């Protein structure tokens, strides 16, 4: 081959590589085709350019004004107004090159996080999870062009990261297979009830304690929270040290505007329930620094399960989870009727997602929907009988047979199984063997599957009157 022809061919083959090495504008993974932007907000658009002081212009085809900023040492960010829900639109980012993000919707955006029961995908193929109940039917119906999904890939880091891995996809039967079942059902319910596009970001990792989702300095600065991690070495299967998942799977999302968070976690904290309210308070505080002081945070209690170390600490963890509702803008879904005693990953995830969505629809979107089961509010002694009162207890009822999982304590300090009936909007509790009761408790074991609900079929949470 002639040398001149060979030189031309080398240049032609090398041209794409040379072009890719030229100056360019790049965006974080969370900004991409098919994404959903939060409606009626000043949302942040950000990225990087290899031209350190370049002028960047951004505009959307929904009629937003062009917004301009200058990069500082290659990094840039700005805010652009979003309208009412709608789309599809395009979003343009222009500097020395023009980037078009296509098929962008405006609507409601939520983040779903936690450990394995949030991670559990719709399908069981290759996942090691059982999959959602009736998963074949669920998958066949999971086609929603205006429901968009972003699955954050698992990564761990010792310091906060600028970006993560993942991409926005349209909700189809194929795309939803590996997506969080709880997050999908939650998003589907919001989409149907609000009739707007919904974007769901799933960032979860099975086996993780809550502390890995919090800035490590926030945990280590508190001696009570830091002590379990003294000398602990990072695991191979999932992160176990404070901040490791936060740094890589939450912090990079901090600029992306969301409406709120749903959270399903707790099994990995059940051996230290006394610190759980403080841990969750720190987690919510840290995340609200990124997404707003009033950002709603709705969470799910852990379900009944036969744990291998029968220490019966689960009721204490559930009680600690309920205490987290004292934090403003939170709410808890009760799942003691949805468990599988032989599997830590119960398959009835549709009910979990729908109950989480009820909290959001009622408390965030001001819709008139039932959202809570009976919540213990007080008690009264009358001789050998105890009368227990509840908030959200209108139409108290038993599902099936007589009320179960009530216990009563006498002056000797011993707990005895008790009879219980619904009477005048309260629950009357007694035991023939306890003439002078001092306390009542309900669903107080790892495997308790009680049957007390309100008129809407939402279950009562465990409680004890002598906490």
Image (spheres, helix red, strand yellow):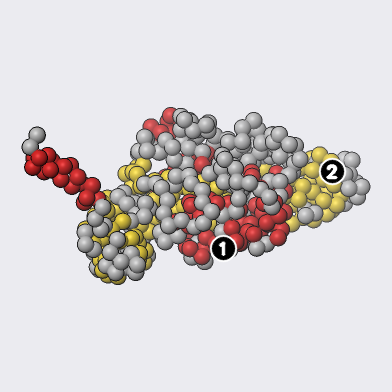
Residue at the (44%, 47%) spot, across then down = 152
Residue at the (48%, 40%) spot, across then down = 181
- Determine the CA span between mark 2 and mark 1: 38 Å
Q: Secondary structure at mark 2?
A: strand
Direction from residue 72 to residue 226 in the image, left or right: right
Q: Secondary structure at mark 1?
A: helix
Q: Which residue is mark 1?
A: 285
Quick one: 240 or 316, which is closer to the camera? 240
Q: Residue 64 appears at what percent x and percent y?
A: 26, 65
Q: Residue 161 appears at what percent x and percent y?
A: 46, 56
Q: Which residue is mark 2?
A: 415
How many neighbours does mark 2 have within 10 angstroms: few (below 14), some (14-19), or many (20 or more)? some
Quick one: 8 or 390, which is closer to the camera? 8
Q: Residue 305 appears at what percent x and percent y?
A: 66, 36
* Among numbered discs 2 and 1, the one appearing first in the sequence: 1
Q: Nearer the viewer, mark 2 or mark 1?
A: 1
């Amino acid at each position: 081959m002639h040398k001149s022809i060979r030189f031309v061919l080398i240049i032609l083959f090398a041209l794409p590589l040379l072009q890719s090495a030229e100056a360019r504008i790049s965006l974080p993974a969370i900004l991409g085709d098919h994404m959903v932007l939060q409606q009626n907000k000043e949302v942040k658009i950000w990225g990087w350019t290899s031209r350190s002081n370049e002028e960047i212009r951004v505009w959307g085809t929904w009629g937003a004004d062009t917004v301009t900023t200058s990069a500082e040492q290659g990094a840039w960010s700005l805010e652009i107004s979003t309208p009412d829900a709608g789309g599809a639109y395009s979003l343009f980012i222009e500097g020395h090159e023009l980037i078009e993000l296509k098929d962008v919707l405006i609507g409601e955006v939520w983040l779903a996080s936690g450990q394995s029961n949030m991670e559990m995908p719709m399908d069981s193929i290759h996942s090691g999870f059982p999959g959602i109940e009736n998963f074949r039917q669920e998958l066949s119906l999971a086609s929603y062009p205006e429901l968009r999904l972003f699955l954050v890939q698992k990564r761990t880091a010792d310091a906060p990261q600028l970006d993560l891995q993942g991409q926005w996809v349209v909700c189809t039967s194929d795309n939803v297979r590996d997506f969080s079942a709880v997050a999908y059902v939650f998003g589907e319910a919001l989409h149907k009830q609000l009739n707007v596009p919904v974007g769901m970001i799933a960032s979860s990792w099975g086996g993780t304690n809550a502390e890995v989702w919090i800035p490590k300095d926030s945990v280590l600065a508190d001696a009570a929270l830091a002590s379990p991690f003294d000398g602990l070495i990072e695991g191979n299967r999932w992160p176990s040290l404070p901040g490791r998942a936060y740094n890589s799977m939450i912090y990079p999302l901090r600029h992306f505007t969301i409406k709120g968070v749903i959270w399903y976690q707790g099994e990995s904290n059940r051996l230290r329930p006394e610190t759980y309210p403080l841990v969750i308070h720190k987690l919510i505080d840290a995340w609200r620094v990124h997404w707003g002081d009033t950002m709603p945070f709705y969470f799910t209690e852990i379900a009944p399960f036969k744990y291998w170390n029968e220490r019966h600490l689960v009721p204490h963890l559930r009680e600690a989870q309920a205490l987290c509702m004292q934090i403003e803008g939170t709410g808890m879904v009760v799942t003691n009727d949805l468990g599988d005693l032989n599997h830590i990953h119960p398959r009835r995830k549709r009910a979990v997602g729908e109950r989480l969505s009820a909290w959001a629809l009622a408390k965030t979107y001001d819709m008139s929907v039932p959202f809570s089961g009976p919540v213990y509010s007080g008690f009264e002694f009358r001789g050998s009988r105890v009368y227990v009162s509840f908030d959200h207890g209108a139409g108290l009822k038993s599902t099936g047979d007589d009320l179960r999982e009530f216990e009563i304590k006498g002056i000797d300090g011993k707990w005895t199984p008790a009879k219980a009936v619904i009477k005048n909007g309260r629950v009357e509790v007694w035991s023939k063997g306890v003439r002078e009761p001092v306390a009542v408790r309900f669903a107080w074991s790892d495997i308790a599957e009680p049957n007390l609900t309100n008129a809407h079929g939402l279950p009562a949470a465990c409680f004890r009157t002598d906490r």
